[in-house]
Image (cartoon, rainbow, N blue to C red):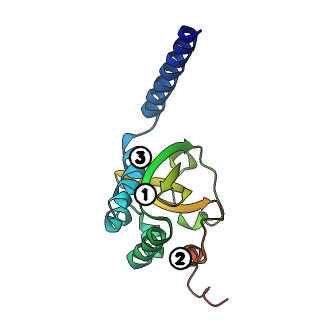
Amino acid sequence: MNKLKWVMMMAGIAFVISGCATIKEKFPLDVDRTAQSFFNDLQKSDNRGAYSLFGKGLSQRVSFDQFDQFMKTIREQWGRIETDDTALLPFHQRMGEADFIPLNVAPQQIKRYVFDVKFQNAEMNFDLTLAPEGDSYKIIWFSVWGSSIYMTPQVRAKIEELFSKPGDAGQ
């Protein structure tokens, strides 16, 4: 019986590995590197490096200082990032995202990654939406979602601050 379990497990691992290789061939590697670099930078507390991966529209809407304060609040509330796992999902537009999609970018060019991010004191999901900008992909939109247990008033306030339109404050 143990041999049967071992064979089944090995077959499953081989299937997963071959599936991952197939996915890698279908998508440009720089998309994977951009998305992963974002979390690598955040794991190293390199907020400026993570911010540099933002596309033109997002970086015009969200200042580095806003992003830096958001990440500092997350670290204070949730601790440091310990691990992140990702999945590539088909693109479907999310509420609020339309303002960040560049003109002349086809939906087939847009990639969305969902990261399951484990912090010292929380586990949350991050969506990263990427689109081509010049000769590489840039992050054009991101969101944070997960259990409301971890969405403290401080974190909620920083999220609202990031994505509120000018003039929305106080309404």
Q: Where is residue 102? Give x, y as percent.
A: 50, 61
Q: What amino acid type should be assigned to the residue bearing mark 1?
A: Ile
* Rendered position, 23 above or below 150: above
Q: In the picture shown, does residue 43 fall above or below 165?
A: above
Q: Which residue is mark 1?
A: 81
Crowding around mark 3 (Cα neighbors within 10 Å: few <14, some 14 to 19, many 20+) is many
What is the crowding at mark 2: few (fewer than 14 residues within 10 Å), some, or many (at least 20)?
Answer: some
Depth check: 67 or 9 in front? 9
Which residue in the structure is indicated by mark 2? Answer: 158
Distance, label 1 to label 3, CA atoms, is 21 Å
Examine the rendering and report whether any part of residue 133 can be seen.
Answer: no
- Is residue 170 shown above or below 97? below
Which residue is pictured at 57% across the width and 49% down the height?
107
Total numbered labels placed on residues in the image = 3
Percent x, y for residue 18?
47, 23
Q: Quadrant of the N terminus?
A: top right
Q: In this rendering, would 8 be left or right of 47?
A: right
Q: Which mark is residue 31?
A: 3
Label 3's element? helix
Q: Quadrant of the C terminus?
A: bottom right
Three-letter amino acid code of the residue under disc 2: Lys
